[in-house]
Amino acid sequence: MLPKQFLATFRKLLTCQTKVMQINETRSFFMGAQRFRDVIDRKEMLRSVPKMDEGSVGEKVLDVDTLIHQKGDIFPDADTPNRLFNGIPFKNLPIVNVRVSPNNTIVSMSDDKGVVKLLRSCGVEGFKNTRKGTNIAAQATAITLGTKVLERGIKTVRVRVRGLGPGRMSAVKGLQMAGLEIVSITDSTPVSWNPPRPRKAKKL
C-alpha cells in the first residue's frame, strides 16, 4: 500500500514540476557575432529605406517648354549683337578667352576687336610643373584676371573657352567669384573632322 501512495505522490510532484517548467521556460540560443551584426545592419538599412510615397509629396510639375518660351532671350538670335547689356551692345563687349590644356590654363582679356589687354596663366601665378594643370590653379588665375578687369572698370564680359583640360569649369567659376557678370559662354574648341590616323593595333 505504501509504495502505491508513494508512487502517486511522486507522479503528482513530477506533473506539477513539469507544468512550472513549461510556464517559466525561456529559450536561449547563441549566434555568432558576425551574423548578429548582419541582422542589426539589415534592420538599420530597412529602417532607413524611404516609404513608398516619401519624396513625391510637395513636388512640383514644371512644363519646360513654357519656361523656355517665357525666357526666349536666353538663346541667341539675329538681334543678339545689338542687344544692350549694361548699356553696351553685345558685339562691343570685351571677351575673356580661356585657353585650356591638360598642362596649363591661360586666361586673357581682349576687346571686341581681338586686341589682348590682359593675360594671366597658371605659370605666371606661381604654380610649377604638374600643379599648373590643376583646376585650383585655373580658378586662382581666373580670379586674379577678374580682379584686374574690374579695376579697369569693366563689369560685363563674354567668355570664350577653348581646349580640353581640368581647368575648363574652374576658370569660369573663378571669373564669377571675382565679381564679373558673364553674359555668354562660347565653346570654341576646334574639332577635327579628319583626325590623324590612329596607331596600329598591338600584337597579342
Image: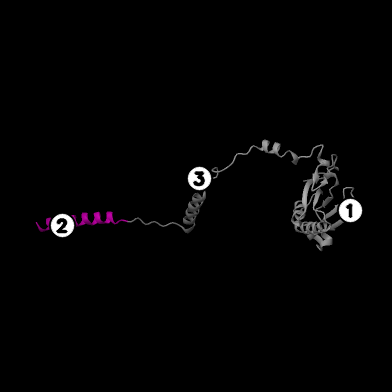
Residue under numbered circle 3: 51
Q: Count neighbours of disc 2 (C-alpha within 10 A) and say few if under 14, some if 14 to 19, many if 20 or more.
A: few
Is label 2 in contact with label 3 (beta carbons under 8 Å)?
no
Find disc 2 in the rendering and name its residue.
Answer: 9
Say what amino acid the circle numbered 1 marks: Val
Earlier residue among tags 1 and 2: 2
Looking at the rendered image, the disc whose residue lies closer to the viewer, 2 or 3, is: 3
Q: What secondary structure is marked by label 3?
A: loop
Q: CA distance from mark 1 to mark 2?
A: 115 Å
**Label 1, on which residue?**
116
Residue 33 point in image, percent of width and height: 47, 59
SS assignment at label 2? helix
Magenta stretch: dominant secondary structure: helix
Q: Left or right: 113 with respect to 16?
A: right
Q: Which region is colored magenta? A: 1-25
Label 3 neighbourhood size at 10 Å, few (<14), some (14-19), many (20+)?
few
**Magenta stretch: includes residue 7:** yes
Please, what is the three-letter code of the amino acid marked with disc 3? Lys
Earlier sequence position, callout 3 versus callout 1:
3
Q: Residues within 10 Å of mark 1 (few under 14, many from 20)?
A: some
Residue 3: x %, y % from top left: 12, 57
Decide: is 76 above or below 123.
above
Q: Nearer the viewer, mark 3 or mark 1?
A: 1
